[in-house]
Image (cartoon, rainbow, N blue to C red):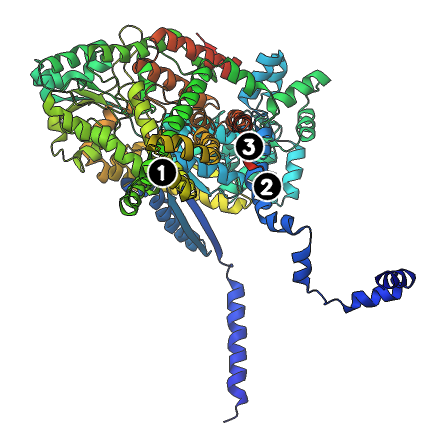
């Protein structure tokens, strides 16, 4: 019978259609719910965030790292400006000193071209007539003299802006004028009667351009600077010491010790260890400074024992590192503690009961039950905190500013100093981005290394029993 | 009563009002934004001066029969870091304020990038009060021969002595009074500083490390010691690294640490602690800024400044250099804007705010120095002993850091080397060698190595 129906259905497509028609109609939402793209749709918002806050910044960092971008070049582009220093560079860098002298002339000339342009601009005819009568053919070698001549006219323009606008019509120089394109600059140079060879044109364009250009100089500079190696060693020391001692090590100690406590005390201790994390960083570091300054707590306590008060925080690199690792570690340990505690809670209780029946000690329970079960959380905390420590510098900045003598300057702090912090406002975005790019690359490489080291595939493989 | 009459009258009145309105110039409304860096509670006139100027400019317009309404939107930043980031990144996004109050050393980079426009394009330099501003301050506000801003204040960075401690090591009152002249003539040099600081400590007048108590963090002040040993910052528009002067400058601070008169871990200490200590005789000698006077005599509670403290130029380093001081004037700068009329109004406001009466309000309230000759004749200014004496003793000798695009990089490298040798991380020779390498790599032919 079944075979008959199938055969009939095959023979008459209309029968299939009517069967479909009989199925309940799906709403739009249900259709989306059944879609194989549902996962992608649900992940889309996260994707947008990853794109906006990870891929685009990384891409821009990559691009900026290969430029000489700075406060002086601006970010959005430059113009062409002939001034004293660019003309000096034309002589020094390209050997066109004579040409530089020719261009580097400021001149104002009262001529027909200027008078006509001023008339078209609506300047009062009496003013122009008087200017022509008194100064026709006269040249001035600076703006102040030109403006003074205009101001002394009987029919002088009514205000300073008008005086300056009138003087502008007689300017026969390109010095200190911004040109938006190289064509405009070259045309202006031509207008003042200077003819350039192709080599000279290229040199003039190069020295007068105020914007950023692509270059690999940042990386050459990074390699040749004596302090780069020191900063790298500082970074590795800071990241791995804090990570091993506190973010993983001490976090494990806290998680395991609170696991063996009663619910009340364990909850209390965990809350206490969360305090550094929820304290605002500026306040948190200030409290450490109160502890360490020469008028602070440590000096006050040690004073009666004959120890001279001193700035314990900045006394020596060893002191500074101790404080920095403690400051960061106290914050970092709390996160590991939370993750490890919840992972220990998820271990089935019968395992502990059974081990106790077998006479296992606490140490044996930790070694054979807890630690093997914490492999995945340890991988997560290690990877996450490595990246986090590598890029974090705020506590170091607040505590030591990289001192004493740059001994606690880590890579991320150095990047911040170069890109966003300069006493004279000379921010080097390009060099900062190149430094940041190194961090991105090291971060990605370390993440891959961790995944291999902890055998991530096995950790996430479906249980064999299924 | 015919109800049509009132409506006819109303129509007539409206027509009349429109006709009258058409007869006068339309009102011009401008909102001018002013952002000011490093502005604490004593520096409110950096912005308020522009507000006062706006009132005057409106009056001037009114006299000409025009209606001008100016609203000033001020924003003061306590520190510099956040302020400079806000300005540079805001300008890239097209949100720069019309007027910026910043250090003169920002002019070079900001002018090069086109962030600021020359004030010279908008104001007559021969008009009042610009024609009365000290020439050296106008020079410090210029770049590439063009005046970019007007000085908002002037200051100077003196060397201070605690009178009682100097008396304690045998100086008579007359000798202490003569110290400023002795410094200026070169009779009292930096080697005397170390010698006397040691004596003060050995006499038990101050604790160890308090004989010579320098500024607690990076600042323009440290360049003064480079100048003291004959260093030159810029020559013919190019930065200069004078190896011998830089070496002697680093060595001076290393010697101070080795003698025990300055702490090895001094840099990075709490500023609050520093102010409290120097203002109340815990240190023998130190250096600071003219604005410190305000803090010493107010929040730090020193009621007798002139009876307890002597001050002069930064002493010279002996035969190589001379006594000096650096002024680090803040300047009013105009940013590149779409609306050129608004920039022209902003320029007028800055010009008016630079008048002696208005500027004296800031000078006295913040214990900075005046910017113009006429300011010395304003009662408020001349009646203030500190302003009067500090202007006479220091301002005439003041130089400034160069307005050079690469100076910020040079500065950071110089201070990095000083810090490394001071704290013992590197020997002076190693620090100098590293500074030399870093300058050559970073600045190439943009710095002259001597």
Task: Give x and y (percent) for residue A402.
Answer: 36, 24
Q: With respect to residue A461, does B403 lie above or below?
A: above
B308 with respect to A102 (left or right): left
Q: Chain of mark 3?
A: A
From the top left corner, tell me how far across and down residue A321 is, in percent: 33, 23
Kindly indicate whether the residues beneath marks 1 and 2 are on one polypeptide chain: yes
* In the displayed structure image, the side of residue A411 where residue A9 appears, left or right: right
The residue wearing badge 1 is A357
Q: Are marks 3 and 2 on the same chain?
A: yes
Query: Which of A117 and B328 lies nearest the eye of the viewer?
Result: B328
Q: Classify the position of the C terminus of chain B by image quarter.
A: top left
Residue A139: image x %, image y %?
Answer: 58, 26
Residue with the mark numbered 3: A456
Image height check: is B212 above or below A188? above
Query: What distance separates the C-alpha of mark 3 from that of mark 2?
Result: 25 Å
User: Based on the displayed image, in which of its 4 quarters is residue B390 positioned?
Assistant: top left
Label 3: which secondary element: helix
Cα distance in 3D space between marks 1 and 2: 54 Å
């Amino acid at each position: 019978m079944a075979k008959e129906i199938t055969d009939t259905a095959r023979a008459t497509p209309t029968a299939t259609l009517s069967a479909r028609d009989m199925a309940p109609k799906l709403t739009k939402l249900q259709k989306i719910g059944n879609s194989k793209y549902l996962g992608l749709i649900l992940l889309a918002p996260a994707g947008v965030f990853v794109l906006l806050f990870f891929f685009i910044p990384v891409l821009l960092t990559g691009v900026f790292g290969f430029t000489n971008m700075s406060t002086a070049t601006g970010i959005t582009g430059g113009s062409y400006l002939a001034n004293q220093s660019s003309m000096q560079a034309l002589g020094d860098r390209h050997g066109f000193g004579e040409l530089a002298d020719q261009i580097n002339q400021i001149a104002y000339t009262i001529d027909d071209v200027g008078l006509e342009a001023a008339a078209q601009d609506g300047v009062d005819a009496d003013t122009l007539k008087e200017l022509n009568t008194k100064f026709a053919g006269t040249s001035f070698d600076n703006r102040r003299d030109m403006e003074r001549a205009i101001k002394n006219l009987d029919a002088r323009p009514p205000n300073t802006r008008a005086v300056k606008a009138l003087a502008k019509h007689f300017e026969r120089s390109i010095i200190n004028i911004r040109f938006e394109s190289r064509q405009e600059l070259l045309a202006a140079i031509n207008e003042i009667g200077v003819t350039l060879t192709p080599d000279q044109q290229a040199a003039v364009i190069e020295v007068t351009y105020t914007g950023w250009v692509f270059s690999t100089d940042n990386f050459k500079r990074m390699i040749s600077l004596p302090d780069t190696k020191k900063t790298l060693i500082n970074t590795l020391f800071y990241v791995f010491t804090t990570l091993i001692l506190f973010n993983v090590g001490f976090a494990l100690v806290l998680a395991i010790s609170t696991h063996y406590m009663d619910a009340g005390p364990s909850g209390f201790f965990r809350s206490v260890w969360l305090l550094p994390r929820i304290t605002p960083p500026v306040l948190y570091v200030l409290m450490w400074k109160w502890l360490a300054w020469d008028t602070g707590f440590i000096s006050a306590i040690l004073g009666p024992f004959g120890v001279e008060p001193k700035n314990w925080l900045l006394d020596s690199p060893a002191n500074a590192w101790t404080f920095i690792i403690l400051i960061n570690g106290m914050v970092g340990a709390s996160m590991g503690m939370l993750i490890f505690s919840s992972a220990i809670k998820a271990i089935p209780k019968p395992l502990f009961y059974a081990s106790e029946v077998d006479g296992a000690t606490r140490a044996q329970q930790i070694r054979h039950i807890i630690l093997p079960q914490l492999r995945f959380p340890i991988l997560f905390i290690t990877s996450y905190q490595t990246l986090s420590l590598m890029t974090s510098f705020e506590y170091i900045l607040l505590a030591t500013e990289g001192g004493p003598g740059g001994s606690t300057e880590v890579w991320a702090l150095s990047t911040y100093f170069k890109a966003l912090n300069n006493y004279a406002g000379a921010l080097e975005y390009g060099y900062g981005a190149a430094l940041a790019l190194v961090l991105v690359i090291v971060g990605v490489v370390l993440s891959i290394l961790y995944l291999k080291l902890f055998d991530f595939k096995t950790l996430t493989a479906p249980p064999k029993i299924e | 009563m015919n109800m049509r009459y009132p409506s006819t009258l109303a129509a007539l009145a409206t027509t009349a009002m429109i006709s009258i309105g058409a007869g006068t110039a339309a009102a011009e409304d401008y909102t001018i934004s002013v952002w000011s860096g490093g502005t604490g509670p004593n520096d409110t006139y950096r912005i308020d001066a522009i507000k006062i100027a706006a009132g005057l400019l409106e009056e001037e317009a009114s006299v000409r029969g025009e209606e001008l309404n100016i609203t000033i939107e001020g924003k003061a930043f306590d520190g510099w870091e956040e302020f400079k980031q806000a300005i540079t990144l805001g300008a890239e996004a097209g949100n720069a304020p019309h007027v910026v109050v910043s250090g003169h050393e920002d002019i070079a980079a900001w002018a090069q990038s086109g962030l600021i426009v020359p004030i010279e394009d908008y104001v007559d330099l021969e008009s009042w009060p610009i024609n009365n501003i000290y020439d050296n301050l106008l020079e410090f506000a210029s770049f590439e021969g063009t005046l970019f801003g007007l000085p908002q204040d002037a200051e100077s960075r003196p060397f201070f002595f605690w009178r009682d401690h100097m008396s304690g090591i045998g100086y008579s009152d007359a000798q202490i009074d003569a110290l400023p002249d002795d410094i200026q003539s070169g009779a009292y040099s930096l080697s005397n500083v170390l010698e006397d600081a040691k004596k003060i400590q050995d006499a038990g007048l101050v604790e160890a490390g308090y004989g010579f108590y320098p500024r607690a963090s990076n600042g323009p002040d440290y360049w003064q010691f480079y100048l003291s040993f004959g260093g030159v910052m810029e020559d013919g528009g190019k930065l200069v690294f004078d190896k011998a002067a830089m070496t002697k400058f680093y060595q001076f601070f290393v010697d101070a640490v080795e003698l025990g008169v300055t702490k090895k871990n001094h840099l990075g200490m709490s500023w609050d602690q520093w102010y409290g200590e120097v203002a109340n005789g815990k240190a023998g000698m130190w250096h600071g800024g003219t604005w410190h006077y305000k803090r010493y005599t107010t929040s730090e509670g020193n009621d007798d400044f002139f009876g307890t403290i002597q001050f002069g130029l930064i002493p010279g380093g002996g035969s190589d250099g001379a006594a000096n001081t650096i002024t680090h004037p803040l300047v009013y700068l105009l940013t590149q804007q779409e609306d050129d009329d608004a920039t022209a109004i902003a320029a007028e406001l800055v010009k008016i705010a630079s008048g002696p009466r208005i500027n004296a309000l800031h000078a006295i309230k913040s214990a900075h120095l005046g910017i113009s000759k006429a300011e010395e004749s304003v009662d408020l200014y001349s009646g203030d002993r500190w302003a009067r004496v500090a202007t006479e003793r220091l301002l005439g000798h003041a130089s400034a850091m160069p307005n050079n695009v690469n100076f910020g990089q040079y500065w950071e490298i110089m201070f990095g080397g000083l810090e490394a040798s001071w704290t013992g991380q590197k020997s002076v020779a190693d620090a100098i060698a590293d500074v030399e390498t870093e300058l050559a790599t970073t600045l190439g032919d943009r710095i002259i190595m001597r």
